[in-house]
Image (cartoon, rainbow, N blue to C red):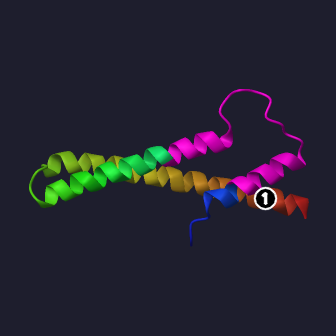
């Protein structure tokens, strides 16, 4: 299963939000900003883990430091994947109701 692009998810979300007349009335961060920040944090964590893995290959980092970092990254990716699946499921349900 391919990963749906964030632009497509956001366009579907905005389309559905527009159907029910939701407007951005507050200065709180919106769905797009929260999701974007989550992806940026995950990307930074991936880059950090890659750097540690490269250092481990040349014996600059102990495996005891790399293993917990990799486990944290695995949890983060699992959370993002579960979140994506929930969003896609909700969008599909809303589209079924519209039809």
Is 84 or 4 nearer to us in this picture?
A: 4
Across and down, in percent, residue 41 comes to 45, 44
Across and down, in percent, residue 13 comes to 75, 51
Looking at the image, which residue is at 62% across and 40% down?
33
Hey, which residue is sitting farthest top in the picture? 27
Q: Quadrant of residue 3?
A: bottom right
Hey, which residue is sitting farthest left in the picture? 59
Looking at the image, which residue is at 37% across and 47% down?
45
Decide if residue 19 is on the left or right side of residue 85. Answer: right
Residue 90 seen from this side: no
Looking at the image, which residue is at 46% across and 54% down?
78
Decide if residue 25 is on the left or right side of residue 62. Answer: right
- SS assignment at label 1: helix
Residue indicated by mark 1: 93
Quarter of the image with the N terminus is bottom right
Across and down, in percent, residue 81 comes to 53, 56
Q: Which residues are magenta?
A: 10-39
Residue 40 seen from this side: yes
Q: Quadrant of residue 6?
A: bottom right
Q: Main secondary structure of the magenta part?
A: helix
Decide if residue 32 is on the left or right side of residue 99. Answer: left
Quarter of the image with the C terminus is bottom right
Decide if residue 99 is on the left or right side of residue 25. Answer: right
Q: Quadrant of residue 21?
A: top right
Q: Residues within 10 Å of mark 1 (few under 14, many from 20)?
A: few
The number of numbered badges drawn on the structure is 1
Is 62 or 93 nearer to us in this picture?
A: 62
């Amino acid at each position: 299963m391919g990963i749906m692009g964030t632009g497509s998810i956001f366009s579907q979300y905005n389309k559905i939000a527009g159907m029910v007349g939701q407007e951005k009335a507050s200065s709180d961060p919106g769905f797009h900003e929260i999701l974007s920040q989550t992806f940026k944090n995950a990307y930074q964590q991936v880059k950090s883990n890659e750097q540690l893995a490269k250092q481990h290959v040349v014996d600059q980092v102990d495996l005891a430091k790399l293993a917990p970092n990799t486990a944290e990254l695995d949890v983060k990716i699992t959370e993002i994947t579960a979140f994506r699946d929930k969003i896609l499921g909700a969008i599909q349900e809303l589209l079924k109701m519209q039809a």
